[in-house]
Image (cartoon, coloured by chain):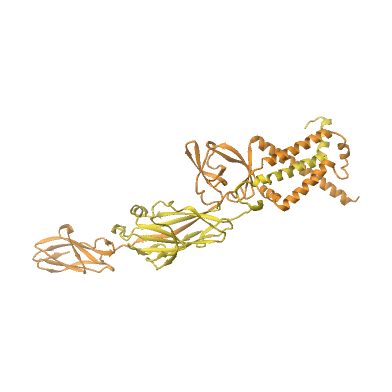
Chain colours: A orange, B yellow
Amino acid sequence: MGALATGLRRASDRLLSVAAVVGALALVAIAAGLVLGVRPVFLTSGSMAPTLPTGTLGLMREVPASAVEVGDVVCVTSSTGQRVTHRVVGVEDAGATRLLTLQGDANRTPDPQPYAVTDVYRLVGSVPHLGYLVGWASSPTGLLAVGALAAGLLVLVVRGGPGGHPRSAGRRRSGGGKRRAVRGAAVGAAVTVIAAGPAAQAAPWTDATTISGTTLTAVTVPPPATFTCGGLGVLSVTFTWSAVAGATSYTLHYGSGGSQTATIAGTSATVVAAIAGGTAWVVANRAYGSTTWSSVASTTRTYTVAVVSLCS
Amino acid sequence: MGSRGGRRRASRRRFTGVRLRAALALGLVGSLGAVGSAAYWTDDVTVSGTTFTAGTLDLQVNSTDAYATTTLGMSGTPMVPGNTSAEVLTVKNNGNVPLKYTLEGGLGGADAATYSSAGVLRLTVVAGGSRSGSGNAATCTGGTTIYGPTALTSNTSTAIIGTRRGPIAAAGTEALCFQITFDAAAASSFQGKTATATFVATGTSDVS
């Protein structure tokens, strides 16, 4: 027997030791989970990344809704029956139940609807990437590989090591009852685990897109830029103003405090009166079908109508 | 583990035993098989063949994640009573999983409350519609009206598409024509008043 064969045997022996330790830990972890009421869930999507990336094994424990606080990661069932694992961003009391607003860490917006819960699974721990291993083990290739591995290990359990480890000959001759008990326990634990398989998880993503830039400004009808008075005659004064584009008429305010009005189509008007004075301004009007918009007032003028009329 | 010599020796033998180690290793296989068993996938989640997909959900409007409208606003040429503006917004699923979406929106800006209380800015959304006309006289034609005409309010969370619409397959699109109408009988007091309509389309991967 060459050095290579010995090395190979040693390597496989070590591998078996490592597998045994990991296997024992897995069984202990699963047993502890069963005792503590921890429910494993797998996250099949990435809405909780980077905290809980796709493929994470989440360990959940059921707690009353009153124990939930903002920041907790919880697993709830949506109205469509889908399980959602997201972080709590809002809590609202609604009688015996509580309304939880959840949001995935990778989501820009919270879930559209709050979830009404009385009891809820809260995250107590997580193992990243384990889901990929389990997912692979469930694929046809994985099943074949796991099956072959299991068969090989079963042969080892029943028949002991091939050729035998130097120390294994002595071991095989003693303590058979204890070993059988341990073996039985291991198989029992595995069967229990199969019965209590975890539930699949989908954490839906959300993505919001903002549509902005729709500015709506109503037009402003400008007043006439200039408003002057001239043509000062005996007992009359003429007001003239500049045209406003689109204006359909103008309203001239005159008299005491501008209390009198006249609607004028053109851009000038003459006020004839007995000896009197007042204040005058004009606004532009623009008709839009069923409504008419009027501008603010133009420059204001003060005038006096008399034998010699005055205006300023 | 005990410290007495005899027990320790016995323990060491037990742990080095091939059979025991194989049995424990079998526990690992059992654990794997357990979680990968049929019971594991009985949920309504459609995960074909238990493969994990690090999928992406990306809802875009006109091929961007934050779109600014170009013809739906009426400010470059300010609007007058009776004006209408329109723009076709294409909702696109830029991810690799199907999505459904909702849409909400309303008015912001200085005079949002004024417009809101008078209800003079009305929105119409037409699925599959196209824009005809131009400037402040553009309208949506064709298609199926799925919203409005309904007055925009200052509550920017007002549901416009409240029931999740879709699904849109990966790389799929849906054209929505938005039309905004400024009431033909709006009062003169709206002169110079400004509001900004903002919408948020939210896609979710939950297509069930």
* Depth order, front residue of A299/A249: A249
* Depth order, front residue of A281/B60: B60
| On-image quarter of the N terminus of chain B | top right
**Residue A167 falls in which quadrant of the image?**
top right
Specify the farthest residue to the top: B4
Tell me where residue A10 appears, x and y as whole percent.
84, 46
Tell me where residue A290 appears, x and y as whole percent.
28, 62
Asked whether the viewer can see residue A163, the reply is: yes
Asked whether the viewer can see residue A51, the reply is: no
Q: In this view, does A156 lie to the left or right of A61?
A: right
Tell me where residue A310 appears, x and y as whole percent.
13, 65
* Depth order, front residue of B208/B63: B208
Position of B26 relative to B124 (above/below): above
Specify the farthest residue to the right: A1
Q: Residue at x 60, y 55 (%)?
A: B55
* Depth order, front residue of A226/A133: A133
Tell me where residue B205 appears, x and y as whole percent.
56, 53
**Residue A154 falls in which quadrant of the image?**
top right
Q: How many marks?
A: 0
Q: Is residue A215 left or right of residue A150?
A: left
Position of A5 relative to A181 (above/below): below
Q: Which residue is drawn at 56% across and 61% down?
A: B171
